[in-house]
Amino acid sequence: MARCTMQRCAVAAIVVITLGCGSGPAPEPVTSPTTSTTPAASPPTSTVTPTSPTPAPDADDDADGAVCDADQTAELAAVVEAQIAALSRGDFAAAHDLATDAFRSQVSLEQFTMIITGSYGFLLAGPDIVVTSCRGDATTVELQVNMYAREPVVMGYLLRRHDAGWAIDAAAVIGSVEGIRA
């Protein structure tokens, strides 16, 4: 039985959401109150509750590499922060441009906008983020990011290096942060 890796789960989620976008009325946008974009000095201690069981990584996962160093983590977090900043400004085109060519060839700007407004509306409020895990190699990295918005969540991101730098290949909510309120 194939395991649900970050890449496979996120791509499956995007495909399911994208397929749902064309069949019937668009879901109501999720809105969040405006929150501060100034990161807290140190986020509260919390526990992560996966939204579904998180299996151990497969031996053939793309991002089974080493733990990222501080410079690489900061570089990757900057890409995620840039996408969130674009979304919080309502600039879906700029946010879409931060995705890989492969993602953009499969998910149009219109579909991307529907996915974000229908399922990831909390990103529009510009939540504060804290990278809690970074693993990968020189070309593919998985980030786990706590997002502190109205309802704190844990997002998983798959980023790939290309000629111009890093780009987001997939992202999905993978859990919630319990024991705190943003």
Image: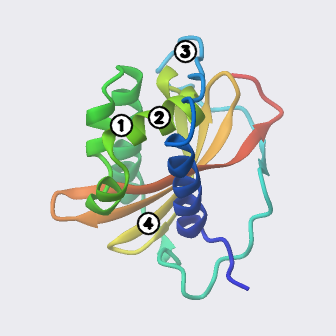
Q: Position of residue 40 (x, y in %)?
A: 57, 25
Give the residue at mark 1.
110
Q: Secondary structure at mark 3?
A: loop
Q: CA distance from mark 2 to mark 3?
A: 22 Å
Point out residue 141 in the picture as x, y percentages from the top left corner.
44, 66
Sequence order check, earlier mark of 4 and 3 = 3
Instruction: Please identify the quarter of the rendering in which residue 55 is found.
Output: bottom right
The residue at 59%/17% (across/down) is 32
Residue found at x 33% / y 29%? 86
**Mark 2 and mark 1 residues within 8 Å of each other at the beta carbon:** yes
Q: Position of residue 34 (x, y in %)?
A: 53, 11
Q: CA distance from mark 4 to mark 2?
A: 26 Å
Mark in front: 4 vs 1? 1
Q: Earlier in the sequence, mark 1 or mark 3?
A: 3
For disc 4, the marked residue is 141
Residue type at mark 2 is: Met
* Mark 3 nearby-residue class (10 Å; few <14, some 14–19, many ≥20): some
Residue 42: x and y in percent read 61, 32
Q: Nearer the viewer, residue 53 or 25?
A: 25
Q: Secondary structure at mark 2?
A: helix
The alpha-carbon separation of the residues under discs 2 and 1 comes to: 6 Å
Tell me: residue 115, above or below residue 149.
Answer: below
Provide the residue designation for mark 2.
Answer: 114
The N terminus, quarter of image: bottom right
| Structural crowding at the residue carrying mark 2, measured as other residues with C-alpha within 10 Å and reported as few (<14), some (14–19) or many (≥20) | many
Q: Which amino acid type corresponds to the residue marked 1 in the rendered image?
A: Glu
| N-terminal label among 4 and 2 | 2
Checking the image for residue 35, the label placed there is: 3
Q: Name which of mark 4 and mark 1 comes first in the sequence.
A: 1
Horizontal arrangement in the rendering, residue 164 relative to residue 139 (left or right): left
